[in-house]
């Protein structure tokens, strides 16, 4: 046993383990940050989806009325319907979105030079688009689970959880069914990432120029608040169209879908209610996106500090 102990001590620390950790760290940081934020804002997300669907179908768009109705129908647990899909989506989508952004910005850096805004924008758009495709199956399941109880009894899908939703969609609609709405989802993610990560980086730099201490709570919180607003503003039109496309069902009589695709959906909505129709529910959306963006960015900062303090 002494010889074995000496052999074990003699084995140097595997560099491949550290390489694997270094490669996966940005993605793990993103997944953790997004999951923390999702648990905090899931009830608001539930109300947001209901308002968007209600607005398109002539129902109530009043957040208080919608919340009361939700609580009356499903109780407090109804506010967390689809949480399993929401967390699965964060692990894949936010993990990839923040991880790829860190990865791309690191690769685009020129030593000793400040990164220009166009480079930051390019990194944010690429990371957002790629991450959305990875997270689409979970996103689709989440929308379906959240809107299920609004359907007539006979039409409900009654998914038991994210796994059941995945298998049911693949069974009924084929593997490609999991990527329904991937184009509007990716476009929305690119707009959201541009607003959130692009403006977070820019706001941090501007605040530092104004004399706010780098890495301080004021800088982290202030930049995340600015990023939260731009993330909401740029992504809502795409989110609104995405929700309509993902929940559409064929007409029971003619078998025709209400929209040919995302662009047709957007044009039809503008025809009915003008361009501002695409910003339906902005206050609720802002209350949902801005805190999620802020909690994600603040959590990301804290998780990064935690890794440093652990020497990782």
Image (cartoon, helix red, strand yellow):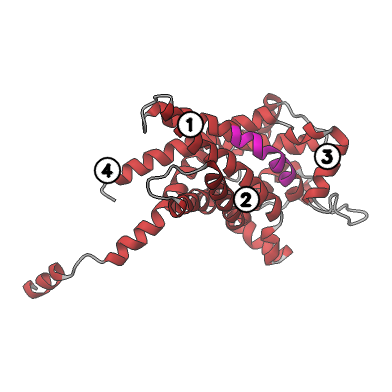
Q: Earlier in the sequence, mark 4 or mark 2?
A: 2
Residue in view at x 60 percent, y 34 percent: 230
Badge nearest the viewer, 4 or 1: 1
Please give the residue where the numbered disc 2 appears in the rendered image.
Answer: 139
Residue in view at x 72 percent, y 39 percent: 237
Q: Earlier in the sequence, mark 2 or mark 3?
A: 2
* Numbered range of the magenta stretch: 230-243
Mark 3–mark 1 distance (CA, rounded to whole Å):
33 Å
Q: Earlier in the sequence, mark 3 or mark 4?
A: 3
Please give the residue where the numbered disc 4 appears in the rendered image.
Answer: 309
Q: Position of residue 83 (x, y in %)?
A: 56, 45
Mark 4–mark 2 distance (CA, rounded to whole Å):
34 Å
Mark 4–mark 1 distance (CA, rounded to whole Å):
23 Å
Please give the residue where the numbered disc 3 appears in the rendered image.
Answer: 269
Whether label 1 touches label 2, CB < 8 Å: no
Whether label 4 touches label 1, CB < 8 Å: no
Which quarter of the figure has residue 241? top right
Q: Earlier in the sequence, mark 3 or mark 1?
A: 1
């Amino acid at each position: 046993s002494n010889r074995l102990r000496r052999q074990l001590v003699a084995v140097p620390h595997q560099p491949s383990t550290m390489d694997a950790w270094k490669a996966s760290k940005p993605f793990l940081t993103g997944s953790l940050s997004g999951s923390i934020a999702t648990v905090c804002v899931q009830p608001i997300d539930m109300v947001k989806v209901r308002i968007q669907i209600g607005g398109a179908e002539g129902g109530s768009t009043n957040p208080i009325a919608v919340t009361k109705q939700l609580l009356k129908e499903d109780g407090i647990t109804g506010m967390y319907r689809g949480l399993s899909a929401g967390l699965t989506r964060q692990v894949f989508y936010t993990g990839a979105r923040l991880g790829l952004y860190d990865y791309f910005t690191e690769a685009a850096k020129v030593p000793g030079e400040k990164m220009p805004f166009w480079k930051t924008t390019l990194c944010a758009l690429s990371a957002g688009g790629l991450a959305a495709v990875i997270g689409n199956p979970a996103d689709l399941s989440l929308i379906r689970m959240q809107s299920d109880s609004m359907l007539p009894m006979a039409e409900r899908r009654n998914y038991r959880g994210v796994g059941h939703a995945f298998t049911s969609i693949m069974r009924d609609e084929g593997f490609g069914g999991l990527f329904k709405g991937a184009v509007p989802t990716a476009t929305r993610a690119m707009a959201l990432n541009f607003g959130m990560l692009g403006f977070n980086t820019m706001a941090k730099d501007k605040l530092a120029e104004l004399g706010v201490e780098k890495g301080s709570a004021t800088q982290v919180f202030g930049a995340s608040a600015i990023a939260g607003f731009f993330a909401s503003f740029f992504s809502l039109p795409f989110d609104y169209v995405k929700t309509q496309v993902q929940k559409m069902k064929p007409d029971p009589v003619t078998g025709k879908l209400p929209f040919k695709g995302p662009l047709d959906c957007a044009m039809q909505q503008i025809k009915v209610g003008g361009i501002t129709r695409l910003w339906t529910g902005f206050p609720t959306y802002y209350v949902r996106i801005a805190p999620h963006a802020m909690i994600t960015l603040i959590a990301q900062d804290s998780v990064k500090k935690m890794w440093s303090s652990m020497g990782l």
